Protein backbone atom coordinates (compact mmCIF):
# COMPACT_ATOMS: atom_id res chain seq x y z
CA UNK A 1 0.00 0.00 0.00
CA UNK A 2 1.44 3.37 -1.01
CA UNK A 3 1.76 6.17 1.54
CA UNK A 4 -0.05 9.43 0.93
CA UNK A 5 1.70 12.76 0.62
CA UNK A 6 5.36 13.54 0.43
CA UNK A 7 7.88 11.13 1.87
CA UNK A 8 9.39 12.33 5.13
CA UNK A 9 12.98 13.38 5.29
CA UNK A 10 15.03 11.29 7.67
CA UNK A 11 15.83 13.24 10.83
CA UNK A 12 19.45 14.22 11.13
CA UNK A 13 21.07 13.32 14.42
CA UNK A 14 22.38 16.26 16.34
CA UNK A 15 25.22 14.22 17.82
CA UNK A 16 26.40 10.65 17.41
CA UNK A 17 26.15 8.57 20.56
CA UNK A 18 29.24 6.66 21.64
CA UNK A 19 29.23 3.05 20.50
CA UNK A 20 29.91 1.75 23.98
CA UNK A 21 29.67 3.29 27.44
CA UNK A 22 32.01 2.44 30.27
CA UNK A 23 31.63 2.48 34.02
CA UNK A 24 32.30 5.84 35.56
CA UNK A 25 34.62 5.14 38.47
CA UNK A 26 34.74 8.78 39.50
CA UNK A 27 31.00 8.92 40.22
CA UNK A 28 30.44 5.20 40.75
CA UNK A 29 28.10 4.81 37.77
CA UNK A 30 27.34 1.60 35.90
CA UNK A 31 27.54 1.42 32.10
CA UNK A 32 23.77 1.89 31.82
CA UNK A 33 23.82 4.86 34.19
CA UNK A 34 26.68 6.44 32.22
CA UNK A 35 24.69 5.89 29.05
CA UNK A 36 21.62 7.49 30.63
CA UNK A 37 23.66 10.52 31.76
CA UNK A 38 25.10 10.98 28.26
CA UNK A 39 21.75 10.63 26.48
CA UNK A 40 20.01 12.90 28.98
CA UNK A 41 22.62 15.67 28.80
CA UNK A 42 24.00 15.45 25.26
CA UNK A 43 21.63 13.20 23.36
CA UNK A 44 18.89 15.80 22.89
CA UNK A 45 16.14 13.68 24.40
CA UNK A 46 13.97 13.64 27.48
CA UNK A 47 14.43 11.50 30.55
CA UNK A 48 12.27 8.56 29.44
CA UNK A 49 13.87 8.43 25.99
CA UNK A 50 17.32 8.64 27.59
CA UNK A 51 16.50 5.66 29.80
CA UNK A 52 15.13 3.76 26.78
CA UNK A 53 18.30 4.42 24.77
CA UNK A 54 20.41 3.41 27.76
CA UNK A 55 18.70 0.01 27.71
CA UNK A 56 16.40 0.12 30.72
CA UNK A 57 13.51 -2.34 30.56
CA UNK A 58 10.98 0.10 32.07
CA UNK A 59 12.35 3.47 30.94
CA UNK A 60 9.73 5.73 32.52
CA UNK A 61 10.08 4.11 35.91
CA UNK A 62 13.88 3.92 35.65
CA UNK A 63 14.26 7.57 34.65
CA UNK A 64 12.14 8.70 37.60
CA UNK A 65 14.31 6.67 39.98
CA UNK A 66 17.54 7.85 38.38
CA UNK A 67 16.55 11.50 38.69
CA UNK A 68 14.79 11.60 42.07
CA UNK A 69 18.07 12.19 43.93
CA UNK A 70 17.35 9.62 46.62
CA UNK A 71 17.87 6.27 44.88
CA UNK A 72 20.89 7.23 42.75
CA UNK A 73 22.38 10.53 44.01
CA UNK A 74 25.56 9.94 42.00
CA UNK A 75 23.59 9.97 38.76
CA UNK A 76 22.07 13.36 39.61
CA UNK A 77 25.52 14.66 40.60
CA UNK A 78 27.04 13.40 37.32
CA UNK A 79 24.22 15.07 35.35
CA UNK A 80 24.77 18.39 37.11
CA UNK A 81 28.51 18.26 36.48
CA UNK A 82 27.94 17.39 32.80
CA UNK A 83 25.38 20.19 32.42
CA UNK A 84 27.81 22.69 33.96
CA UNK A 85 30.56 21.52 31.58
CA UNK A 86 28.24 21.88 28.59
CA UNK A 87 27.04 25.31 29.72
CA UNK A 88 30.64 26.50 29.93
CA UNK A 89 31.56 24.90 26.60
CA UNK A 90 28.63 26.40 24.69
CA UNK A 91 28.29 29.69 26.56
CA UNK A 92 27.98 32.70 24.34
CA UNK A 93 30.74 35.15 25.16
CA UNK A 94 31.87 38.28 23.37
CA UNK A 95 35.15 36.54 22.52
CA UNK A 96 33.43 33.53 20.95
CA UNK A 97 30.96 35.75 19.11
CA UNK A 98 33.78 37.94 17.80
CA UNK A 99 35.77 34.93 16.62
CA UNK A 100 32.75 33.46 14.90
CA UNK A 101 31.86 36.75 13.19
CA UNK A 102 35.45 37.16 12.02
CA UNK A 103 35.38 33.68 10.45
CA UNK A 104 32.03 34.44 8.79
CA UNK A 105 33.41 37.69 7.41
CA UNK A 106 36.55 36.02 6.02
CA UNK A 107 34.63 33.15 4.43
CA UNK A 108 32.01 35.46 2.94
CA UNK A 109 34.70 37.73 1.51
CA UNK A 110 36.58 34.76 0.02
CA UNK A 111 33.36 33.58 -1.64
CA UNK A 112 32.55 37.01 -3.05
CA UNK A 113 29.58 37.46 -0.71
CA UNK A 114 30.39 41.07 0.07
CA UNK A 115 27.03 41.99 1.62
CA UNK A 116 27.44 39.21 4.18
CA UNK A 117 31.03 40.29 4.85
CA UNK A 118 29.98 43.90 5.41
CA UNK A 119 27.17 42.76 7.73
CA UNK A 120 29.61 40.70 9.77
CA UNK A 121 31.98 43.69 10.01
CA UNK A 122 29.10 45.89 11.19
CA UNK A 123 28.24 43.34 13.88
CA UNK A 124 31.91 43.13 14.93
CA UNK A 125 32.06 46.92 15.21
CA UNK A 126 28.93 46.95 17.34
CA UNK A 127 30.30 44.15 19.53
CA UNK A 128 33.51 46.13 20.02
CA UNK A 129 31.57 49.31 20.80
CA UNK A 130 32.95 51.08 17.73
CA UNK A 131 29.51 51.91 16.37
CA UNK A 132 26.38 52.99 18.15
CA UNK A 133 22.84 52.22 17.18
CA UNK A 134 21.24 55.67 17.10
CA UNK A 135 17.68 54.34 16.93
CA UNK A 136 17.60 53.92 20.70
CA UNK A 137 14.76 55.52 22.58
CA UNK A 138 15.80 57.79 25.40
CA UNK A 139 13.46 58.06 28.33
CA UNK A 140 13.83 61.66 29.44
CA UNK A 141 11.35 61.55 32.32
CA UNK A 142 10.79 65.27 32.17
CA UNK A 143 7.76 67.50 31.97
CA UNK A 144 8.63 69.63 28.96
CA UNK A 145 5.79 72.08 29.62
CA UNK A 146 7.45 73.18 32.87
CA UNK A 147 10.95 73.46 31.36
CA UNK A 148 12.44 76.48 29.60
CA UNK A 149 14.28 76.17 26.29
CA UNK A 150 17.60 76.45 28.12
CA UNK A 151 16.60 73.70 30.59
CA UNK A 152 15.66 71.40 27.70
CA UNK A 153 18.95 72.09 25.90
CA UNK A 154 20.91 71.44 29.08
CA UNK A 155 19.05 68.17 29.76
CA UNK A 156 19.61 66.98 26.16
CA UNK A 157 23.29 67.81 26.56
CA UNK A 158 23.44 65.62 29.67
CA UNK A 159 21.64 62.72 27.99
CA UNK A 160 23.55 62.83 24.72
CA UNK A 161 26.91 63.88 26.10
CA UNK A 162 27.07 66.97 23.91
CA UNK A 163 27.55 70.68 24.48
CA UNK A 164 24.10 72.38 24.70
CA UNK A 165 25.43 75.40 22.75
CA UNK A 166 25.84 73.22 19.64
CA UNK A 167 22.08 72.73 19.21
CA UNK A 168 20.38 75.06 16.80
CA UNK A 169 17.08 76.47 17.91
CA UNK A 170 15.04 77.07 14.74
CA UNK A 171 11.93 78.18 16.67
CA UNK A 172 13.47 81.40 18.08
Image (cartoon, helix red, strand yellow):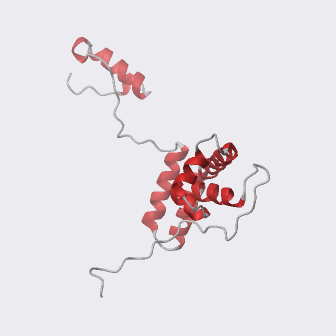
Q: Residue at position x 53%, y 66% from top?
A: 14
Side of 10 where 1 appears, left or right = left
Q: Mark yes or no: residue 119 visible.
A: yes
The image quadrant that residue 106 belongs to is: bottom right
Q: Quadrant of the N terminus?
A: bottom left
In the image shown, does 169 or 45 lie closer to the viewer? 45
Give the percent coordinates (x, y) of residue 47. 53, 53
Instruction: Specify the quadrant that holds the C terminus.
Output: top left
Splitting the image into 4 quarters, where does residue 142 fall? top left
Is 47 placed above or below 152 here? below
Q: How many marks?
A: 0
Residue, far bottom: 1
- Residue 46: x and y in percent read 50, 55
Measuring 45% from the left and 64% from the top, which residue is drawn there? 116
> Would you identify the image quadrant in which residue 148 lies?
top left
Image location of residue 5, percent across then percent down: 27, 79
In the rendered structure, the answer to whether residue 158 lies left or right of residue 148 reads right
Q: Residue furthest right?
A: 25
Residue 114 sits above or below residue 83 on the image:
below
Q: Nearer the viewer, residue 114 or 66?
A: 66
Taking depth in this image into account, of 97 and 56 the one nearest to the observer is: 56
Give left or right: position of 155 versus 15: left
Q: Position of residue 18 (x, y in %)?
A: 66, 68
Residue 93 in sight: no
Q: Left of 83 or right of it: where is 25?
A: right
Kindly identify the residue that appears in the image at 75 percent across and 59 percent down.
Answer: 23
Amino acid sequence: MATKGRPRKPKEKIVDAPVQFEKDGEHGLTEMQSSFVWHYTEGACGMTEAARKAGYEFPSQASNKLLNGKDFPNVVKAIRIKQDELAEKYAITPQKTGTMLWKVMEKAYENGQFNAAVSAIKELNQLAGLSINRSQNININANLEKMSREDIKERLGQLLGADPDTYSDKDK
